[in-house]
Image: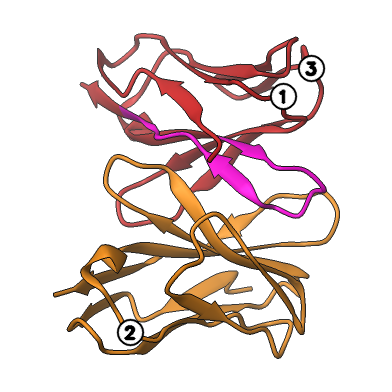
Amino acid sequence: GQQLNQSPQSMFIQEGEDVSMNCTSSSIFNTWLWYKQDPGEGPVLLIALYKAGELTSNGRLTAQFGITRKDSFLNISASIPSDVGIYFCAVDRGSTLGRLYFGRGTQLTVWP
Amino acid sequence: NAGVTQTPKFQVLKTGQSMTLQCAQDMNHEYMSWYRQDPGMGLRLIHYSVGAGITDQGEVPNGYNVSRSTTEDFPLRLLSAAPSQTSVYFCASKEGGGGEQYFGPGTRLTVT
């Protein structure tokens, strides 16, 4: 099956630091998504990217859709304790049917 | 709107037992899907539906059945539970075309 390589697997940072995580694929995808999952809950969409080279921000979050359409990164600036959770990249397999492939996730821990 | 609701929240089954995981959405979304999440893994698509009466297999469909008799409901059936089906199950829905996919809170299933 399709593999999305997401790194790092986990991060332990201090409040106020910036965070960067990325996701790569061997295949081209036309939609890249970043989700956050809090403990005991379902994933929630943070940012959706639809165009190669696109850079999109949502508050302290910034994500980019790689120009090759095979990668994406997510940056979080000035982290706060509520940023703790698991961050997933995902791609839509096409046709906007919502059939998503997910990366394995980045577990983020923020120390106060 | 309640969004996407799932019941039960927790379930323990013995090997060979059957059960149905319930999923409902009140957003009149056309597309609904089921994912499973295993430790250290991203979510993997089990089955999906593009409308009432229409279902198709995802990435890991074996051991699961689905049906979609109404727009609102998309139950997932395990006919003969196996320990390999121990997982957290998430239901999701989205409207047709583009748009965000909304996830339910999950059902944590343990098969002994």
Instruction: Name the amino acid type tagged 2.
Output: Ser
* In front: label 3 or label 1: 1
Give the colour scheme of this rendering.
Answer: by chain
Circles 2 and 1 on the same subunit: no
Separation of marks 2 and 3 at Cα, in angstroms? 44 Å
The front one of B103 and B49 is B49
Tag 1 residue: A28
User: Are both tags, 2 and 3, on one chain?
Assistant: no
The magenta stretch is: A90-107
Location of residue A35 with respect to A20 vertically, above or below: below
Secondary structure type for disc 1: loop
Tell me the tag on residue B80.
2
Mark linked to residue A52: 3
Left or right: B62, with A28 as reference point: left
Residue drawn at x 79%, y 29% as measured from the top left: A50
Do the residues at pointers 3 and 1 share their chain? Answer: yes
Amino acid bearing label 3: Ala
**Type of residue at label 1?**
Ile
Q: Residue at x 62, y 17 (%)?
A: A71
Q: Position of residue A69 (x, y in %)?
A: 72, 18
Check the rendered structure and report the hue given to chain B.
orange
Q: Position of residue B35 (x, y in %)?
A: 49, 59
Q: Chain of mark 2?
A: B
Question: Between B21 and B64, which is closer to the camera in this rendering?
Answer: B64
Q: Indicate whether residue A104 is drawn in magenta.
A: yes
